[in-house]
Image: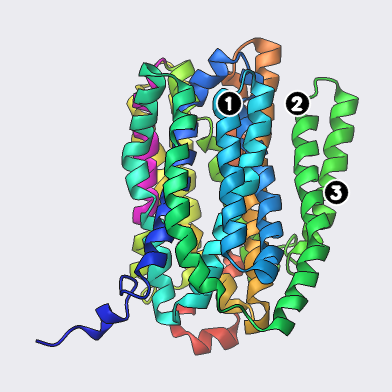
């Protein structure tokens, strides 16, 4: 009986099994944490009397993550993979510990920033580990496997977090993740040590390290700019609000322009447009996502467990959308998945807005937000595929880094702007719902802009000849 050579050389072969398990467990942990925190945040904000800082709990994590993404890039070149991963996981754990013990919302916001510094190290380390250790024919399968790692947390994570938050307390959700971090750390570090034994050549590493060191201040400026914009939007006085917002936008755009491919802010075809569209996609979705639980629990009076069902359905449909596009790449050109994804997500998010009306059954929120997740799944990965296809071999690293940066900036601005609008609504009316309606409308407007710009992803004629499926 002959063994299947594909299995002997697959992701689960003896020489690759530990790395596959380690990366999948790491993504699973990050996914569970993200969904759990989103589920319990209404209870946290109520107990700590800090609904005005609700959005900042998510924005601070993303601002820290933005810096972590850039810092770890240089650390990988100088130190390999294992040490940066260990430090990142340690910062992530410290943030969870302080967050679980936080006596106030400002302390929780600070803890989430530290947690974000650590969390931001995970994607670059995972991508580099895959690039260095897996042959090209296995990389797409590994990305799909990592995407599927969100399914189990999506199915059980919100429900577990909701139940623990109601029966034990929200602090147990934060602190209960610490033993899992220790387990994942031990399993993954051993696998990364093997990968770190084969670093890139010294000349290339030194060159990239110098580039990363020069990029770090720019990444901090982007983070500072996003923060100033968000703070400015929360200031009740018009003049200080305008000053902070304009200053933040200026700093952020100046730095972002230097950290992304030329023409990104103008959506120049094709690669720059893909980098920009990733940011617009995350702005649109996460401007809704972090407030779904608030709408269902605080406004519609549902339980944490019931709101968790909505997040679960959305996660499952996001993964389904990812697999649909992965299995049909030879039938549709890549940019068509992005266009379809924006359109489907817009339809789902617009449908979810009707849940703000008390006379509409809250159950409408489950299929509508899940539909939005399906649309994001259709569009998210194809943007990365377009960037890798359009970038030359010697610029794929910087192009992928730019994609991650706009991803994080879009998410941070989406949550930050929405949070600021909701906070202003609470100050002026005592209710978050008017602000939620405006915030959701802003997110939809950004999504419409993304849909209109998605036509710029159509490949150049020369590329269409090389890849006929991209021409239609």
Residue 108 left/right relative to 157: right
Q: Residue at x 41, y 22 (%)?
A: 165
Front residue (pair 154, 292) = 154
Q: Earlier in the sequence, mark 3 or mark 2?
A: 2
Residue 107 left/right relative to 327: right
Asked if residue 87 can be seen in this view, the reply is yes
Which percent across, then down, holds residue 421? 67, 27
Task: For marks 2 and 1, give the CA distance.
Answer: 14 Å
> Magenta segment range?
301-321
Classify mark 2: helix, strand or loop: helix
Which percent across, then down, holds residue 463? 56, 85
Relative to 285, residue 380 above or below? below
Q: Quadrant of residue 240?
A: top right
Relative to 110, residue 459 above or below? below
Which percent across, then down, holds residue 115? 61, 41
Magenta run includes residue 341: no
Q: Residue at x 35, y 61 (%)?
A: 323
The residue beneath circle 2 is 234
Q: Residues within 10 Å of mark 2 (few under 14, many from 20)?
A: many
**Circle on res. 436:** 1
User: Residue at the top extreme?
Assistant: 430
Classify mark 3: helix, strand or loop: helix
Labels 3, 1: front one? 3
Relative to 135, residue 341 above or below? above
Q: Earlier in the sequence, mark 2 or mark 1?
A: 2
Task: For marks 3 and 2, give the CA distance.
Answer: 18 Å
């Amino acid at each position: 009986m002959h063994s299947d050579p594909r299995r002997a050389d697959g992701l689960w072969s003896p020489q690759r099994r530990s790395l596959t398990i380690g990366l999948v467990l790491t993504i699973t942990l990050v996914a569970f944490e993200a969904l759990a925190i989103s589920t319990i945040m209404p209870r946290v904000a109520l107990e700590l009397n800090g609904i005005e800082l609700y959005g900042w709990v998510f924005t601070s994590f993303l601002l820290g993550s933005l810096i972590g993404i850039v810092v770890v890039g240089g650390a990988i070149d100088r130190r390999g993979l294992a040490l940066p991963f260990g430090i990142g996981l340690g910062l992530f754990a410290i943030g969870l510990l302080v967050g679980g013990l936080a006596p106030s919302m400002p302390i929780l916001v600070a803890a989430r920033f530290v947690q974000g510094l650590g969390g931001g190290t995970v994607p670059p380390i995972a991508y580099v580990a895959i690039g260095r250790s897996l042959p090209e024919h296995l990389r797409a399968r590994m990305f799909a496997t990592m995407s599927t790692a969100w399914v189990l947390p999506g199915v059980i994570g919100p429900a577990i977090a909701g139940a623990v938050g109601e029966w034990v307390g929200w602090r147990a959700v934060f602190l209960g993740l610490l033993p899992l971090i220790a387990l994942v750390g031990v399993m993954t570090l051993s696998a990364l040590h093997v990968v770190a034994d084969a670093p890139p050549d010294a000349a290339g590493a030194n060159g990239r390290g110098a580039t990363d060191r020069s990029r770090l201040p720019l990444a901090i400026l982007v983070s500072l700019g996003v923060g100033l914009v968000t703070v400015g939007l929360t200031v009740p006085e018009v003049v200080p609000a305008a000053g902070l917002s304009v200053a933040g936008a200026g700093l952020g755009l100046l730095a972002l322009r230097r950290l992304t491919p030329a023409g990104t802010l103008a959506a120049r075809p094709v690669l720059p447009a893909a980098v920009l569209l990733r940011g617009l996609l995350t702005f649109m979705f996460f401007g809704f996502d972090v407030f779904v639980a608030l709408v269902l629990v605080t406004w519609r009076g549902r339980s944490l467990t019931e709101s968790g069902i909505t997040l679960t359905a959305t996660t499952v449909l996001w993964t389904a959308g990812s697999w649909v596009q992965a299995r049909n790449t030879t039938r549709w050109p890549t940019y068509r998945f992005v266009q379809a994804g924006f359109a489907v997500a817009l339809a789902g998010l617009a449908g979810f807005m009707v849940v703000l009306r008390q006379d509409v059954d809250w159950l409408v929120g489950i299929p509508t937000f899940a539909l939005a997740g399906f649309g994001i799944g259709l569009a998210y990965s194809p943007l990365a595929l377009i960037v890798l296809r359009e970038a030359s071999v010697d610029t794929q690293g910087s192009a992928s880094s730019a994609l991650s940066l706009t991803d994080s900036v879009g998410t941070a601005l989406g949550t930050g702007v929405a949070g600021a609008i909701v906070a202003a609504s609470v100050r002026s009316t005592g209710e978050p719902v008017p602000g939620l309606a405006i915030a959701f409308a802003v997110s939809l407007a950004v999504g419409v802009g993304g849909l209109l710009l998605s036509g710029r992803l159509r490949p150049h004629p020369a590329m269409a000849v090389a890849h006929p499926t991209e021409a239609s």
